[in-house]
Image (cartoon, helix red, strand yellow):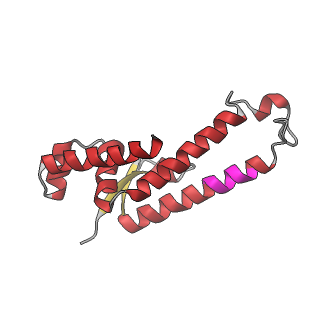
Amino acid sequence: MLEWIKIRVKDFYKDAIGETEYTYVTKEVYEALTETFRKEAHAQEMRDLRHVTREGYTEGETEDLAFDSGESLEDMVIRQMELETLQKAMQSLTEVQRERLHLYFFEGLTYRQIAEKKGVGEKNVRESIAGALKKIKNFFD
């Protein structure tokens, strides 16, 4: 039985034009899209970092353009480290925990809706999500 995941088209195709805001893809396609965009974002970040000098200037741009976000290099490094920690934390979760977190946080489903969708008890979903969040929190302690 195929499992379908609802995605927002513009999250994966930035230049998408049309009336369709959401579409459904299989789990395999969703994972492939997510991994591809993660790798592309990382590659772009590495390309950008190669062009930043130690003094904070970006080759070919003025100082104003280099840090238009207002975020210091130290803050960017800290944010990157936090993202890497979060990725490790997510990898430590079971597939069920990752799926339930996704449904809860990214699709906005309630514990009851997740339980009904997956054919399990609401208490089971609540405990699974709480356990996953506790595991993630431990990575940051």
Quarter of image, res 39:
bottom right
**Magenta-colored segment: predominant secondary structure:** helix
- Does 109 sit left or right of 56 as displayed? left
Q: Which quadrant: the N terminus?
A: bottom left
- Does 127 sit left or right of 51 as displayed? left
Residue 3 covered by magenta stretch: no
Please provide the residue range marked out in magenta.
Answer: 41-47
Point 51% across, 61% down: residue: 35
Up-down relation of residue 32 to residue 141 (above or below) = below
- Does 35 sit left or right of 69 as displayed? left
For this rendering, which residue is in front, 70 or 128?
A: 128
Asked whether the viewer can see residue 117, the reply is yes
Residue 43 covered by magenta stretch: yes
Which x, y percent locates residue 42?
A: 63, 54
For this rendering, which residue is in front, 76 or 131?
A: 131
- Does 5 sit left or right of 45 as displayed? left
